[in-house]
Image: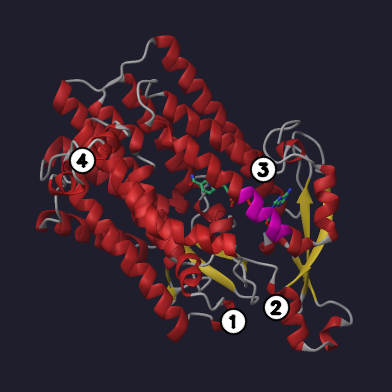
Amino acid sequence: MATHQEKKPAEGRKHQNMQNDTKASQGQWGRAWEVDWFSLASILFLLMFAPLIVYYFIMSCAQYQCSLTDPLLDLLTGNKHLSDIWNRTPTLTYRAAGIYCLWVTFQVILYMSIPDFCHKFLPGYVGGVQEGAVTPAGVVNKYEINGLQAWIITHVLWFANASCFHFFSPTIIFDNWIPLLWCANILGYAVSTFAMIKGYFFPTNAKDCKFTGNFFYDYMMGIEFNPRIGKWFDFKLFFNGRPGIVAWTLINLSFAAKQQELYGEVTNSMVLVNVLQGIYVLDFFWNEAWYLKTIDICHDHFGWYLGWGDCVWLPYLYTLQGLYLVYHPVQLCTAHAIGVLILGLLGYYIFRMTNHQKDLFRRTNGKCRIWGKKPEYIECSYMSVDGTKYHSKLLTSGFWGWARHFNYTGDLMGSLAYCLACGCEHVLPYFYIVYMSILLIHRCIRDEHRCSSKYGKDWKRYTAAVPYRLLPGVF
Ligand code: NDP
């Protein structure tokens, strides 16, 4: 976004009262300044029920072979009491706490202590120190992009252990899955609470803080825009990428190892889930510099939504397919497996190409070719808190001419492929596509609301030029 924008002091505006500027631009970025009742109700719902939802899914697998209805039926018919289910749930163990502390510490060391070397020998990879977007207060943060390296080192060590050293079993994650859930929750709540306190008492950049005055909203959606410890420890980049996303592929590998241990083979569905999700994860790290320009980093503040979400929701619910396949080892017929593979790869291609087109367009300030032609775009402008006027461009060529969020469409196709890999016996593995649809449709609406207040009439011209959000002619 703003990195490729030309910064021009707006004529006449410089002399206006600063307070008016601030007021005028308050609505432009990130989360809301005022909380409507619907947002508040949704937030309270999520704060209360999101941890329960995670527990319910994981417990259903551990105690009910992944059936989502049987625990409810048991409770409703009085067959079981809540206490029966709770008493059968593994508690926090010293072993899990030790594993989790080691894991997070190791990721902190990889993040903070080893400057990126991958960009020195991998052609096309952008790593090392990179700049983020301009924040509402006009700050441009620097980031050490070394996620790919952290992912490679972690996985090399994992495979070295599994094949040579045997310090621990590759099923270690599965074997400690519920005790590790308690550890992840402790970290998720600790980091969100710390971020809130930090926002009040020692923010990294006070001008980039937002206070609605509503405790729950501020806790959930965050106060600080880019909380940091020291110059380099960036909460958003660290918690989203590692431990969350580095763990994703390790968790899947551990599930595959468990299948092997239990049934003496790894099914083709498990291989598909590992491969398709592995591509998605690797793509994330290969494009970590691009990630600095996505909504998570550019617009969202750091609160429980990102802090707890990255520690608990992501590793536990994005990996449900692998977990399900441990309990239900599905061997797909060749046609089904090929269908899933094609859908997954096609979804990934659309996701990547759409994101790439926008990135290339913004990076070159429109001086590029999209599908072999000069790109078409809408010129637009917006204002930062200090009253500086910025110019930007909205692409209307390539996939961005088909729909305003075709990258989400590709993501949804890929998500559906992971679910379809699990067959049709249970609904649990389909949670991911339901969740992603809600997340991305809500994100569309949230982003468009923000862009509309950021770009004003220019945004209207853009939506007139590209009328559909996800599917041309449908939505
Ligand atoms: P986008 O990458 O689509 O970024 C939206 C921003 O891009 C807008 O706020 C606007 O920012 C800019 N923009 C919008 N339209 C245009 C245009 N036509 N031309 C140029 N710039 C435009 O969204 P996200 O950051 O949400 O998503 C990035 C990727 O991450 C997506 O592919 C998504 O599917 C994926 N994702 C995956 C999630 C998961 O959990 N697996 C969660 C969320 C996202 P500006 O202010 O700069 O104009």
Which quarter of the image is occupied by the C terminus? top right
Name the side, left or right, on which 188 lies relative to 39.
left
Q: Nearer the viewer, residue 414 or 40?
A: 40
Residue 350 in sight here = yes
Residue 202 in sight here = no
Q: Which residue is depicted at the point 40% across and 36% down?
A: 278
Kindly identify which residue carries mark 4.
174
Kindly identify which residue carries mark 2.
385
> Which of the labelled discs sits on residue 405, or is there none?
3
Using the image, determine if residue 422 lies above or below residue 185.
Answer: above
User: How far apart are the two marked residues, 2 and 1, measured between alpha carbons?
Assistant: 9 Å
The amino acid beneath tag 1 is: Lys
Q: Secondary structure at mark 4?
A: helix
The answer to whether the residue labelled 1 contacts the one labelled 3, judged by CB atoms less than 8 Å apart, is: no
Kindly identify which residue carries mark 1.
207
Q: Which residue is depicted at the point 57% across and 32% down?
A: 349
